[in-house]
């Protein structure tokens, strides 16, 4: 059995990972349906709503996705990275479209 050592993060990544530990543990302890419901609510408000409220909901969803993508980036393959970048681009574009009208 081989043991694989993960490279230790340094600098900004280490700080973000350390500060993200408590919120990630909090989210992990919630019932599975609760974060899913929150994401669906933000998406629904963003897609159905108009103006700044819809843009804020989509922006919050984009920020959440960017945070999780950043935390998972080192272990993702090319396909996973491309999917996260594409999803983030779609969310940001939809938020900007809600602001512009």
Image (cartoon, helix red, strand yellow):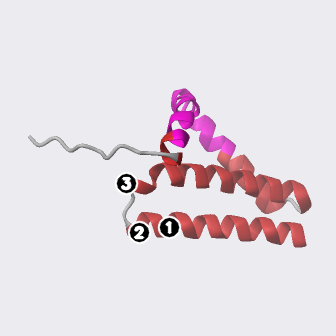
Horizontally, residue 66 falls left or right of residue 83, namely right
Q: Give residue 11's position: percent from left, percent from top.
A: 49, 46
Quadrant of the image occupied by residue 73? bottom left
Horizontally, residue 61 falls left or right of residue 83, namely right
The residue identified by callout 3 is 75
65 up-or-down from 89: above or below: above
Quadrant of the image occupied by residue 24? top right
Q: Give residue 86's position: percent from left, percent from top.
A: 57, 70
Horizontally, residue 79 falls left or right of residue 55, namely left
**Dot 1 alpha-carbon crowd within 10 angstroms: few under 14, some 14 to 19, many 20 or more:** few
Q: Give the CA separation, mark 1 to mark 3.
A: 14 Å
Which residue: 66% across, 47% down? 39
Q: In which quarter of the image is the N terminus?
A: top left
Q: Give the CA separation, mark 3 to mark 2.
A: 11 Å
Mark 2 residue element = helix
Q: Do the residues labelled 1 and 3 touch (CB within 8 Å)?
A: no
41 up-or-down from 33: above or below: below
Q: Are marks 1 and 2 in contact (CB under 8 Å)?
A: yes
Bounds of the magenta span? 15-38
The residue identified by callout 1 is 83
Which residue: 61% across, 39% down? 35
* In magenta stretch: residue 23: yes
């Amino acid at each position: 059995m081989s043991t694989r050592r993960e490279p230790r993060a340094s600098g900004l990544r280490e700080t973000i990972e350390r500060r993200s530990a408590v919120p990630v543990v909090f989210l992990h302890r919630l019932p599975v349906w609760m974060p899913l419901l929150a994401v669906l609510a933000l998406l629904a408000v963003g897609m159905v709503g108009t103006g700044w409220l819809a843009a804020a909901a989509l922006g919050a969803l984009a920020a959440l996705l960017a945070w999780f993508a950043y935390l998972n980036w080192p272990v993702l393959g090319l396909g996973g990275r491309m999917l996260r970048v594409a999803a983030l681009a779609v969310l940001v574009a939809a938020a900007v479209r809600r602001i512009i009208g």
